[in-house]
Amino acid sequence: SRELDDLNPNTYWINGAQHLANGHYDEARDHFANARSAARNDFFAAFHSAWIRLTDLVESATARNEADFLECVEALRRDENEEADAKADQLMEARRAFAS
């Protein structure tokens, strides 16, 4: 059942990441927003919101977008979810890959 619960948000997320990699920023944001809507809890909704902030940063590397992204990552790290550090680290790796 957990695998089924994760299917929709993960499918949206992987499609969002593919669009991000291809420079299709509006489509990436749409998929990440759908993943956020389908998330099973607030932690995962925040994780997908951080991917939207990463998309904003990749599209336009402004100080504001960088600050918004880092704020989302730090909020994830402060969460008590057992996956908090791993998800925050994943986002920072993605930032290095996509926003460099």
Image (spheres, helix red, strand yellow):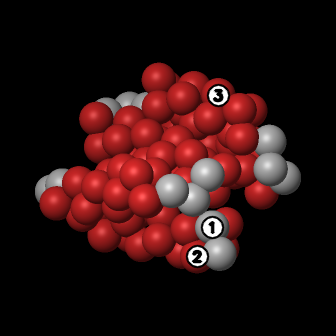
Local packing at callout 1 (Cα closer than 10 Å; few below 14, some 14-19, many 20+) is: some
The residue tagged 1 is: 99
Left or right position of 50 against 73:
right
Q: Assign a secondary structure to mark 3.
A: helix
Local packing at callout 3 (Cα closer than 10 Å; few below 14, some 14-19, many 20+) is: some
Residue 82 image point, x, y percent = 25, 62
The answer to whether residue 16 is above or below residue 26 is below
Residue 64 image point, x, y percent = 40, 52
Q: Is residue 44 visible?
A: no
Seen at 55% across and 68% down, the residue is 95
What amino acid is at disc 1? Ala
Seen at 72% across and 41% down, the residue is 25
Q: Which mark is residue 30?
A: 3
Seen at 51% across and 56% down, the residue is 62
Q: Which mark is residue 96?
A: 2
Residue 21 image point, x, y percent = 77, 57
